[in-house]
């Protein structure tokens, strides 16, 4: 059997990640995919009045995709690129928790999550050269242990919560708070790998070819 030769670098389609998140970049790399450019969008991520968590996360992921695609299509080098965008929202019931930026926000989130279940919604959007967007919404249920004041104070002191949806990072110290998770772990981190790879392949991106190159 003749082994399929990897695509030459010049022939490989370009890939854009619409994010500056180190977590999303690391997850994409975990799937054997190295983006050619990072094109994050500077958006107002505040929910609209009465907006549900699943509607907010879809809206933001689409907006990130639109901004990155417009920037990519405006260049010769990235004009025919594939674009990947995602957003993650943490909610308790219909209450959307913030991406904590100050200690008080993070402390309020942790007290609310302590000893109860919450939902993490991640929307993933992919756009290929044909400009036909595809998207998926992933819902994951997470239950935290009951957190003591000492645990909350220690986690706040770590600073790991800063900029994280719901005031915690499951891939870090807060992983020890999780009693149960039903759904996609990578989606909670920020990029659902199964859905991302499936959407890219559905649009014709040679995911397996990138794997051969990596090897």
Image (cartoon, rainbow, N blue to C red):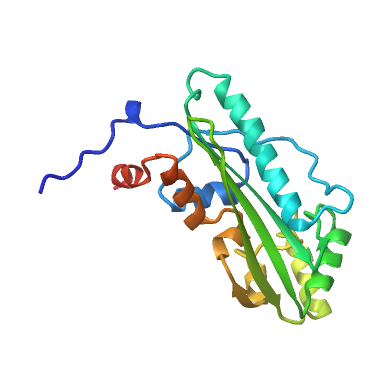
Q: Which residue is at a point 65% across and 36% down the rendered structure image?
A: 40
Residue 136 in the image, given as x and y percentages of width and height: 58, 52
Q: Residue at x 47, y 21 (%)?
A: 77
Residue at 49% from the left image edge and 48% from the top image edge: 28
Nearest the viewer among 191 and 38 is 191
Task: Determine which quarter of the picture holds residue 210.
Answer: top left
The reply to whether residue 159 is visible in this rendering is: no
Q: Position of residue 194 (x, y in %)?
A: 48, 57
Left or right: 195 as drawn, with respect to 114: left
Whether residue 58 sits left or right of residue 37 in the image: it is right
Q: Nearer the viewer, residue 94 or 10?
A: 94
Which residue is more in the foreground, 20 or 56? 56
User: How many callouts does the rendering have?
Assistant: 0
Q: Compared to 118, does 194 lie above or below?
A: above
* Residue 143 seen in render: yes
Residue 137: x and y in percent read 62, 55
- Residue drawn at the location 86% of the way across and 59% of the way down: 105
- Position above or below: 79 against 177: above
Relative height, residue 130 to residue 85 (above, below): above
Indicate the position of residue 69 as horizontal and vertical percent values: 59, 30
């Amino acid at each position: 059997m003749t082994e399929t030769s990897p695509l030459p670098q010049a022939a490989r389609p370009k890939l854009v990640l619409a994010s500056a998140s180190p977590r999303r970049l690391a997850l994409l790399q975990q799937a054997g995919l190295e983006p050619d450019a990072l094109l994050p969008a500077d958006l107002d991520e505040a929910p609209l009045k009465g907006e549900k968590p699943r509607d907010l996360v879809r809206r933001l992921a689409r907006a990130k995709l639109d901004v990155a695609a417009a920037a990519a299509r405006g260049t010769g080098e990235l004009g025919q690129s594939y674009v990947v965008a995602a957003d993650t929202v943490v909610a308790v019931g219909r209450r959307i928790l913030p991406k904590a930026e100050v200690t008080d926000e993070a402390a309020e989130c942790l007290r609310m999550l302590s000893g109860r279940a919450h939902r993490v919604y991640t929307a993933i959007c992919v756009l290929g050269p044909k400009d036909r967007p595809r998207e998926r919404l992933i819902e994951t249920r997470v239950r935290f242990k009951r957190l003591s004041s000492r645990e909350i104070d220690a986690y706040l002191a770590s600073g790991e919560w800063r900029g994280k949806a719901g005031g915690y990072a499951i891939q870090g110290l807060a992983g020890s708070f999780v009693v149960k998770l039903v759904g996609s772990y990578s989606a909670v981190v920020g990029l659902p790998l199964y859905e991302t790879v499936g959407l890219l392949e559905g649009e014709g991106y040679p995911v397996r070819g990138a794997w051969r190159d990596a090897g």
